[in-house]
Image (cartoon, grey):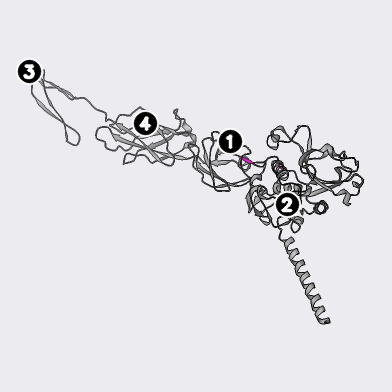
Amino acid sequence: MKRLKTGFLVAICLLSLLIAIFLANRTADVHAYTAAQRSELQPTDIALSRERILRSAKAHIDRANETGYSANNVLKGTEYLPLATSNRGFMCVDLVTHVLYTATASKINGRYHSIAKTLATRHAFADSNGIVFDTSGVGVLRQQLTALPQLYTRYLAPIDISQLRLGDIVISGDKDSALSPTSNGANKHATLVIGKVTPEENEYLKIPNYNPNTSYFISMSSMSGARWVSTNWYDRDWNMGDPNKGYFISNLFRMRWEPSQQDYGGFRIKKVDATTGAGLTGAEFNLRDPKGEVKKIVMTSSEYVSGLEYEPGIYTLTETKAPEGYTLDPTPRTIEIEMDKINSVYWDEPIANAPSDGFVRVTKRDAVTGENVAGAVFDLSQSSTFPAGSTIRLTTRADGTTVPQRFGIGAGTTVYVREVSVPAPYLRDPTVKQVTLIPNQTVGVTFENHRARGHIELTKQGTNNTPVQGAVFEVRNSANALVATLTTDALGKAETG
């Protein structure tokens, strides 16, 4: 019998141990910046904006008034349940911790989520970057905040309520316990300070009896539900016949980081000549966002500045069209968009394009026979005045062409060509011709020249100096080729045309 009792006790102990291990494992399952990780978390690790706090506060107040007052405990599990589909009620500590979690959970599975998307996405806490607090009680929340001096600065009563600001977590309770910050009476309520709200912000918050000069906090109670409350209600009684009852502040926890103003960010870039640094217009880019979607950006000036219109994340900027006269730079460039910031990486170090080169080749031909003419001399310049310092002189080769001459299109797209001299017996063409450069191509220009022509007149006379009509003459060139046949007229005269 004694052995049976001993075995029974051993079994009970083993069962208790298994239960303890199970409960311990459940606690350890919550990975997203909870007790196991918060000691390593630094303010620089947190991405939080004023907009996220306000919109999260609005969403949770509305939902809390729909589901009512009760222990929520959602943040004690291992995953976040979408706000609209969870029917669990809220206590004051639930309201504060849920707003903080969803406001800081800007990334889920490594991808940015707007506050609306975070609120609507079921996900494991371990997959987000949000700050998870235990929602079991106000005192527990105070203890957790106290254990995070790298994230929150703790202040004890008395507190100057005129200095409260966005994100302050206020622990309050009975008046006679305010100076005993760890007592039960001093840890009855948890509220989150919002501060003053602009009229533009109230367009979506819709605070009852809104006043732009009022500083607000959010609160949840069994009697009044979730609501926006003036910070003037701190450190005063609730007018319920007991001057000891109210939001008497015992502890204040202030974030050690400044929230960004807006949830979205932007960027700015400059486009310049790689040689001179002069601004360039007309470039076009593709901007690929973290989801793979592409937006076309056309630079109508040398500068592009976006608004705060892009979700935080890593973007890729790729040039698809270079400014006219310049070589395309297809290098993909990474741009990191952060909350409420304008990325200026490619503003401070502008994206440069090298001028494109075009080529010009001059051809010289006989205007009549089409034969190539060697030895003709031409001037080429990108200025119509042919200045000495920038004018290039070329001579046609045996095939009647010059070597292709390179020109930088950045200096202009027009090249002027004039004929300087021609070999005999050709006549020089005084025309100045214009050529339009094409990037990375050779453009040709042709000069056709006539030979210089002489005129032959002859007279045929008899022995007595009388005209002889009908005499026939052959005109041959130096190669003895027949050029013309002339026949004298009644006056004995004949001439070439």
Q: Name the residue under label 1.
A: 303
Q: Can residue 238 be seen in this view?
A: yes
Q: Which is more foreground, mark 2 or mark 3?
A: 2
Residue 263 part of the magenta segment? yes
Mark found first going from the N terminus, 1 or 3: 1
Q: Which of 201 and 312 is in front in this view?
A: 201
- Which mark, residue 420? none
Q: Please, what secondary structure does the residue beneath circle 2 have? A: loop
Q: Residue at x 55, y 41 (%)?
A: 352
Asked whether the residues under the numbered discs 2 and 1 touch, taking CB atoms below 8 Å apart as contact, a structural biologist would say: no
Q: Is mark 1 on a helix, strand or loop?
A: strand
Task: Kindly identify which residue carries mark 2.
Answer: 131
Under mark 3, the amino acid is: Asn
Q: What element carries label 4?
A: strand
Q: For this view, does 86 lie left or right of residue 180?
A: left
Q: Which numbered disc, 3 or 4, marks the residue that appears first in the sequence?
A: 4
State the extent of the magenta-drawn residues as a range.
Answer: 257-269
Q: How far apart are marks 3 and 4 (CA)?
A: 53 Å
Looking at the image, is mark 3 or mark 4 nearer the viewer?
A: 4
Q: What element carries label 3?
A: loop
Marks 1 and 4, how far apart in space? 43 Å
For label 2, the crowd category at 10 Å Cα-Cα, with few meaning under 14, some 14 to 19 and many 20 or more, is many
Alpha carbon of mark 1 to alpha carbon of mark 3: how far?
94 Å
